Image (cartoon, rainbow, N blue to C red):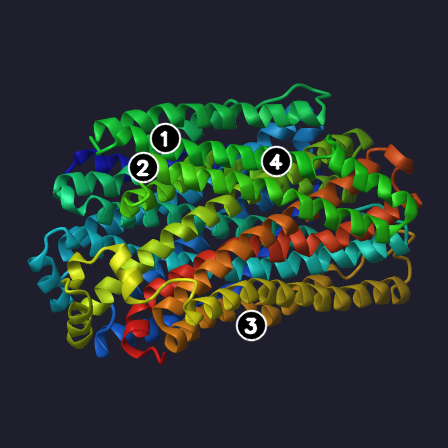
Amino acid sequence: MENKVFFLVPVSAVLALFFAWYFFHQMKKESEGTISMQKIAKYVREGAMAYLKQQYKVVGIVFLIITIIFSFMAYYLKIQNPWVPFAFLTGGFFSGLAGFIGMRTATYASARTANAAQQSLNAGLRLAFRSGAVMGLVVVGLGLLDISIWFYVLQFVIGALDNATNLTIASDSSMKLIIITTTTLTFGMGASTQALFARVGGGIFTKAADVGADLVGKVEENIPEDDPRNPATIADNVGDNVGDVAGMGADLYESYCGSILSTAALGAVAFAAKGTAVQFNGVIAPMIIAAVGIILSIIGIFMVKSKEDASQKQLLSSLSRGINFSAVFIAIFSFLILKYLNIPNYLGIWGSMLAGLFGGVAIGKITEYFTSAGFKPTQRISESSKTGPATVIISGIGTGMISTAFPVLVVGISIILSYLFASGFDFSNISMGLYGIAISAVGMLSTLGITLASDAYGPIADNAGGNAEMSGLAPEVRRRTDALDALGNTTAATGKGFAIGSAALTALALMASYLEEIKIAIARIPEKTELFFNAMQTDIHQASIPQLIEYFQINLMNPRVLVGAFIGAMAAFLFCGLTMNAVGRAAQNMVQEVRRQFREIAGIMEGKAEPDYARCVAISTKGAQKEMLLPSLLAIIIPILTGVIFGVSGVMGLLLGSVSTGFILAIFMANSGGAWDNAKKYIEEGNLGGKGSENHKAAVVGDTVGDPFKDTSGPSLNILIKLMSMVSIVMAGLTVAWSLL
């Protein structure tokens, strides 16, 4: 170890896990309320666990097959690093574990939040937020712990299974950290694969139940949301946990790890010529920043509280207090960290990180403006309900499209500033510029511990409202839980904005990491090494990014690049189409089942008979398991086939097309969905006729369209664009060895 400060990384990871344990046990000490409240919570908990058990069986089979393929490539074909299969498995395991712990916490917290809301709004907010903090701290804790363990162990064993790696390191000592960091990127692929299955499967489950419950319950039967007479209401609450908690936890776990790992990989390249000590510091810098971000997130979590009868803006301000504290102080401490590590141009790199941090805050504020019921765009969507559901849908789509312009400008400005600050305002200094872009993504996610807490808090508040309604608690309690739920919709949309913005920046960094992996892949094949030397008169180990771009003809005049870009753009739309249709098919089955129960089970509407909740849970589970495989597998297959057919230049085009189109499409879908949801809630607060009015029914229809937008297709896209990058990196050896064109 070149610098002992590295050990702050595992220490902060363990600290995060300790506080996650502390908040979990503090939550468990609270009362779960009445027998009825406990019974409902038990239904939801059992349904969520049953679903995850089935999902992990399917994902386990997929992981086994992929691991066998990686092992074949590494040990038989010898075109891949032999540590890749192991890194892939641990990434997937910890991603799934983070989602599982978060979901388990949420299923215990919802009834307790409802019970706390009987005391006061602040009691409900505090319990729900700290329960959400369990998810945030588990994600950052497990992520940094796994990264630090792999990074430490690989220092000693990187060449143990691979003589080619030893020869490469012997020829150039700077290659050791380059190979280590590109190997750990495979860990990111495992996390991304797990996250995609969790997001897609969980998203299909929750939205099938939500759409079925709303269309039949609210619109057709005119009964309130979460009414115990609705057979789909338990499935809806289960879905909030498996989709919006477990799926979202796995999602942001891979975002967090991907940003750190890609920055470390680019740091190994950018500082390779500065000596091993400087190179090492450049690699660990994003890890140290993330470690300090954990400590600040923990402090920020304790700062979140509100007063009774707080408005939506005041509640949002309560959450913002802790988040803003963490953001301000990470900006200060990151400067001290970079200066202490004595990284060349540390001031410029600090500027790059600030550009990402402010970019993340700006995207969050833009998202808040377009999705919160406290602002004009969402209120205008509510107003459009006066002329029926069609105009609600039109207004929501238009608002979502307009909302994409500002995040794109923010990300564009962040990219340019990050590049220029880190490169010393020299566009030709590509390696340092790309390092700046990567560390700006780290800046966006540096305080994920608390920003994710504000995201995970939302489903807990939503389930608390459902429990309050089904348990027949006082209207005042439901009013408080509705206020917390509406706030959760805004924070969830803000969290998605952060994830999508960081995905765009991380994907650009991963494109550069891909070219570095291509160098390593060429070095493993003697004839490819010779061809490169003959063409460029440069040893492959010393090749720069511009030389690789020239060698592989990565430019807009190359038809392979253009075709790859079209395929990448197509992949984003194809993926969204498949997941939207999957939700539609599953929702159709749910609607039919709910109608059947209302029709055939006597006494449901009178409250004399209990609906068959388990049947609805089973329908959502079956639909999700059946529908999640195709879109998830396509995300893995498309970059492999593109690489095999069109080679390196085709893959670079693919990644460019997927990140540009996927980013904009994800913003559009997330913001449209969030705005539709809060437009409905704005009416439910008593505006424009309130609950049960024709305006409300029109807004409910808009919300059902927005549900798969914001909770299935949209949030899955940021995983898609990073997973395709990760797959490309891991399959670089195959692309180099066997590409047809």
SS for tag 1?
Answer: helix
Compute the Cα span from label 2 to label 1.
8 Å
Which disc, if any, is residue 366?
A: 4
Q: Position of residue 231 (x, y in %)?
A: 79, 58
Please tell me which of labels 3 and 1 falls first in the chain: 1
**Label 3 residue SS:** helix
In the rendered structure, which disc, 3 or 2, sits on the residue that comes first in sequence? 2
Report the Cα–Cα distance between label 4 and label 2: 26 Å
Q: Which image quadrant for residue 617?
A: bottom right
**Residues tagged 2 and 1 counted as in contact (Cβ below 8 A):** yes
The residue identified by callout 1 is 351
Amino acid type for the residue under numbered disc 3: Leu
Which quarter of the picture shows residue 172? bottom left
CA gap, disc 4 and disc 1: 22 Å
- Disc 2 marks which residue? 422
Judging by the rendered image, the residue that carries numbered circle 3 is: 630
Distance from the alpha carbon under mark 3 to that under mark 4 = 33 Å
Q: Please, what is the three-letter code of the amino acid marked with disc 1?
A: Gly
- Mark sitting earlier along the chain (4/2): 4
Which class describes the residues within 10 Å of circle 3: few (<14), some (14-19), or many (20+)? few
Nearest to the eye among marks 3 and 1: give it.
1
x, y percent for residue 224: 84, 45
Query: Looking at the image, which residue sits at the far front?
Result: 557
Name the spot of residue 733 as percent of width and height, x first: 28, 70
Residue 634 visible (yes or no): yes
